[in-house]
Image: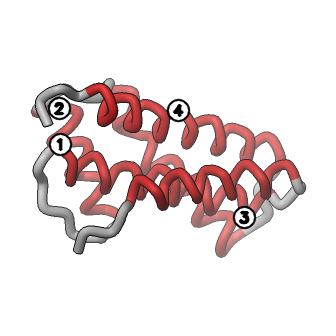
Amino acid sequence: MKEPFIARAKENLAVAESTFEAGQYNASANRAYYAAFHAAIEALRFFGYDVTIDHKRVQADFSQNLIHRRKIFATAFKSYLTDLMLVRFDADYKREVSRKEASAQLKKAHEFVTTILNVIENDTNH
């Protein structure tokens, strides 16, 4: 399984931005989460971890291995995937996400994806 998850992350982030601009805040919140989720998978794979495509497992592995153990990413990112997933769940199944929530979701996803891309692109050990 060698899907280009970074390409998926970039695509989802672009769709999150365009749906936000179109006023489709639920769709934007959904795609923003998946942008971050796919970026986390790419980061785990890049740093040599086997990945089980399970939302809670990816969140736990990213936090445990890349934040706490190896200190590659800032502690602030520990809650990002969980926070993004909760808003995505609301958007998909519970209620309408507001423009303000979708904007915060998009900002968080953009920061997460951009940071991961920068780390991967600037890593000289791989």
Q: Residue at x 47, y 50 (%)?
A: 36
Report crowding for label 3: few under 14, some 14 to 19, many 20 or more residues within 10 A (C-alpha): many
Report crowding for label 2: few under 14, some 14 to 19, many 20 or more residues within 10 A (C-alpha): some
Rounded to the nearest whole Å, what is the CA distance between mark 1 and mark 3?
29 Å
Rounded to the nearest whole Å, what is the CA distance between mark 4 and mark 1?
20 Å
Report crowding for label 1: few under 14, some 14 to 19, many 20 or more residues within 10 A (C-alpha): some
Q: Is mark 3 on a helix, strand or loop?
A: helix
Q: Nearer the viewer, mark 4 or mark 1?
A: 4
Q: Nearer the viewer, residue 99 or 22?
A: 22
Q: Which of marks 3 and 2 is in front?
A: 3
- Up the image or down, 119 lies above or below 42; here it is above
Residue that label 3 marks: 27
Q: How is the image coloured?
A: secondary structure
At which x and y percent is residue 82? 43, 50
Q: Which of 18 and 89 is in front in this view?
A: 18
The amino acid sitting under disc 3 is Ala
Rounded to the nearest whole Å, what is the CA distance between mark 2 and mark 1?
5 Å
Is 1 displayed left or right of 22 in the figure? left
Whichever of callouts 4 and 3 sits on the residue coming sooner in the sequence is 3
Q: Residue at x 14, y 37 (%)?
A: 126
**In the orientation shown, which residue stands out farthest toward the right?**
23
At which x and y percent is residue 111? 52, 32
Q: What element carries label 1?
A: helix
Residue that label 2 marks: 68
Q: Nearer the viewer, mark 1 or mark 3?
A: 3
The amino acid sitting under disc 1 is Gln
The amino acid sitting under disc 4 is Glu
Residue that label 4 marks: 111
Q: Which mark is residue 64?
A: 1
- Up the image or down, 104 lies above or below 8; here it is above
